[in-house]
Every structure is written in C-alpha cells, then in structure tokens.
Amino acid sequence: MNIKNNSSAPYEEGPDWQRRYDENSTRWERGSLNPAFGYWQKQGAFAGIASVIVPGCGRSPEPLAFANMGANVTALDFAPTAVTFQKDAFVNAGLEAQIEAVDVLKWQPRQPVDAIYDQTCLCALTPAVWPDYTDQLYRWLKPGGRAFMLFMQTGKEGGPPFHCALSHMREIFDETHWQWPDEPPQETDHSNEKVELGVILTRR
Ligand SMILES: C[S@@+](CC[C@H](N)C(=O)[O-])C[C@H]1O[C@@H](n2cnc3c(N)ncnc32)[C@H](O)[C@@H]1O
C-alpha cells in the first residue's frame, strides 16, 4: 500500500464521536482484547509499566487489563459514553483509574508516564493534526518510555479511520525523537478487511 494521508490537506472537523455511540455505529469495537495486546503481554513487553495512558480509550477493555496488571491507568476520551463506560468498568472491578473527559490534543498529565497504548486513536484524528498528536505523546512519556502503537491500514483515502502508512508514520514519529524497533510490525486483522500494525516506539 502506498497511500499517504497528506497532513497539509484541508480537513473537516472530526466526526461527532458521541453520536456514533448514540447510533451504535461503533464497528471499531472488538468486544475483547486486541490480539496484539495479548501478544505483547505474552512476550513480557508490558513488564515494568507502572503508569500508562490510553488515549481515545472508547469502551475498550485494555485500560482495565492494564490496571489488572497493577499499572496506574489514565484513560482519556471526550465522548461521554466512553468515559461513563470506563468509570463503570473500573467501579465494577473494584479498581481505580484516572478517567478524563478531555481532548487528547490539549490535555497534559501531571507527570510523564512509562507507556502509552494507542488503539485506533491516531487513526481517528485527522492527519492534519497528527504532528500535534505525536508532540503530545512525546510530552506525555518519560525518556525511555514506550508507545504501543496500532497503526491502522485501510489502504484508502479519507477516514476515519485514516490510513497510517508506515512511511508516513516514520515521518511523524521521527528518529530524532523516537526509536523504531528492529523487528517487523505485529500484524493483526481488524474489521472490514482492515489490518493494524503493532509497533513499539521508544521515546528518546
Ligand atoms: C475509533 S474509536 C476507538 C476507541 C477505543 N480505542 C477502541 O479501540 O475501542 C476513537 C475514540 O477516540 C475518541 N476521540 C477521538 N478524537 C478524540 C480527541 N481529540 N480527544 C479525545 N478523544 C477522542 C472518540 O470519542 C472514540 O471513543
């Protein structure tokens, strides 16, 4: 696939995500842990993570899974349904987390964290704001902190979800700020013939 989302292209305001929840138009939801999450967990890639941010958490189960591993979780989403869901999930599990109804492009943590888990948040944002978003991820992480990225491959123009071509990802997560792994991305099927490429980036 050789599609690159032109980050300087004009773009419309993002979709009304709350409306998607209201209309039950949430095809991105798996209803279970992402296989890449399971793979990374089995590989021990999450070992030593004391604090993690999950931006655009939606109703995904991964924030709770991190909390079950003992991590201090911050889950972010500006859709009220997502925030309420995560709060209820943590209350029901008897666990604590910082769950914030915020814009990921504006929010800052009180202190930098060990890890970020991005599952269909980047691809939900219009490519014009991707450099702002990667700046945010860089600021949120401690030096040496890791960003667990699932780069959505749609092979199509437009979105969301927007196609996250690896060549484009290497530009916005540039080598000056991010260390890319030697191993190839972890490939996971998603809905509607889409594929996610799991990559662990280390903040320099
Ligand atoms: C495609 S969904 C993915 C949800 C979740 N990560 C999952 O895997 O099920 C994108 C989520 O990001 C949230 N979102 C999009 N833009 C956002 C922003 N600028 N700030 C906070 N949340 C945002 C939406 O409300 C939505 O819940």
Image (cartoon, rainbow, N blue to C red):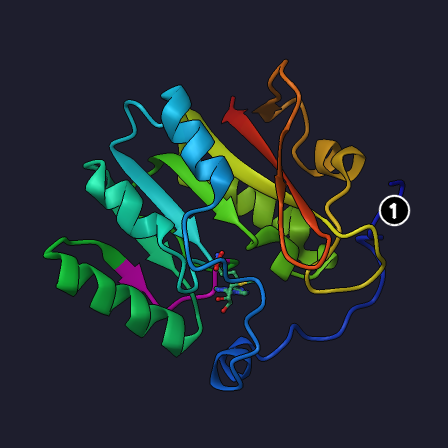
Q: What residue does disc 1 label?
A: 3
Q: Quadrant of residue 60?
A: bottom left
Give, as a three-letter code, the residue at label 1: Ile
92 on left or right of 192: left
- Per the rendered image, the range of residues in magenta is 99-104
Helix, strand or loop: magenta stretch: loop
Q: Residue at x 28, y 37 (%)?
A: 51
Residue at x-position 55% and y-position 27%: 201
In the image, 18 versus 175, the foreground residue is: 18
Residue farthest to the left, as pictured: 94
Q: Is residue 102 magenta?
A: yes
Instruction: Report helix, strand or loop for mark 1.
Output: loop
Where is residue 169? Give x, y as percent: 71, 37
In the displayed structure image, the side of residue 38 where residue 64 appears, left or right: left
Image spot of residue 101 (x, y percent): 36, 69
| Few, some or many residues within 10 Å of mark 1 (<14, 14–19, 20+) | some
